[in-house]
Image: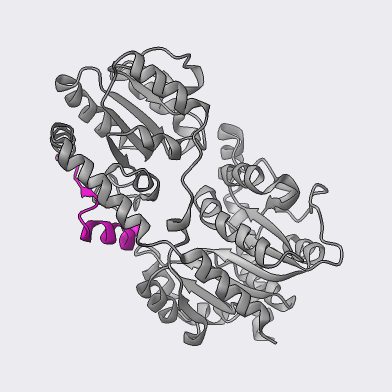
Amino acid sequence: MISSLYSFLYSVALAIAMLVSLPYWLFQMARHGKYRKGLEERLGRVPSRLQLPEKRPAIWIHAVSVGEVLAVAGLVEELKRRFPQRRVFISTTTDTGQALARERFGEGNVFYFPMDFAFAIRPYLQALRPQLVVIAETEFWPNFLRLAHASGARVAVVNARISDRSWPGYRRFSKLLRRLLANVDLFLAQTPEDAARLRDIGAKPERVRVSGNLKFDIPVATPGAIMESLRKSIAASAAGPVLVCGSTMDGEESLLLKAFENVLVQHPRAVMILAPRRPERFAAVAMLLQQMSIAFFKRSEWNGESLAGKVFLLDTIGELSALYALAAVAFVGGSLVPHGGHNIIEPAQHGVAILVGNHTENFRDMVSLFQSRNALRIVGPAELPLVLLELLANDAERIALGQRAAETMRSQVGATARTADSLEELLARP
């Protein structure tokens, strides 16, 4: 009775919040096209393209966006191999995650995650009839967890982490969370600290394990056609060195471009590949380049022209990971400004010297690990130009820094197998 009351009150509060924020969502749809795609699926309409399992049992994996899709890609393949009799479906929240998931797993296996209302969730549970629901990282949607558990499915949260930013908020509501997290049968945390935080906010201790970070098992991205085109152009025009600045956020590009101007004084044929994190910011970054009078080409308009002394604005999705291989030095964004940082694994896979800013709270353990092994450099805005010039002037140190990053990566692999073992054990429970 109390549980039903909480669910009702939560649903009412969620509906009111959505109504109040409706102008914002409409603005985002009109201005940036966000949230428009898959709206019917989000509202509970099961798409006809899904290859429903008929009498075959299913596994439902939820991965919010691109990072989570990449993280679970190896797990999806491993679960298919271990459970050939089960269909594996993947849901995402963002458009970019949806596009990547359809490319990786096939349109017949991928759909948009429903809004957290019973009327939107039940059609998917009825259509898929999952025996196992797997949630990547920490997507704690109350109605979804409650209904998935009530359907008879085993529920697991994998690659779980509690960031420094979210932990205080979770602790404030730990009494309510304890009831919510009781719907999860297994938590597989990235680190012992994440496991401790999960127990602290209400997860039952016997249900929490440490399995490692799935992102360390992400395979190196396959180079696309753009990689060969860039290699040829850079070689033909004797351009370089190449700086790759990925996943940048508002407020960072101006700092990075000023640093690039300093680099050009000593390296007039240097190239910066600049990849803003969010597609809706591509136009704003292009305008910033124009305002700063920095020569640049958009990836979408580039036809092989020389990039010496110019910026290559990567205004596409899904190509950044492979392009880190071109870098003499890579900067990973969201860290010069207080956004918590982004994943450093992609440049590490290529053995590239990595720089990040001071704001890496969302990846604290990963950054701490690399820092402890002298496998990256942390810089503030004032230090950035000096450190870039220092590394570009010292080939031996720069190459060694990248090699240590690659070695650190290799030392952490294995989370996918450990996660699959735990999920197999969970499914085998009577």
Judged left or right of residue 399, residue 84 is right
Q: Which residue: 36% across, 29% down? A: 273
Say if the magenta span includes residue 263: no
Residue 20 in the image, given as x and y percentages of width and height: 58, 53
Q: Between 6 and 376, which is closer to the camera in this rendering?
A: 376
Q: Quarter holding the C terminus?
A: bottom right
Judged left or right of residue 55, residue 117 is left
Q: Quarter holding the N terminus?
A: bottom right
Q: Which residue: 70% across, 46% down? A: 106
Q: What stretch is highlighted in magenta?
A: 362-382
Q: Locate residue 200: give its quadrant.
A: bottom left
Q: Which colour scheme is used?
A: one colour
Q: Between 234 and 156, which is closer to the camera in this rendering?
A: 234
Residue 132 in the image, given as x and y percentages of width and height: 68, 71
Q: Locate residue 366: give its quadrant.
A: bottom left
Residue 280 in the image, given as x and y percentages of width and height: 50, 34
Residue 180 in the image, given as x and y percentages of width and height: 57, 77
Q: Can you say whether 350 is above or below 45 in the image? A: above
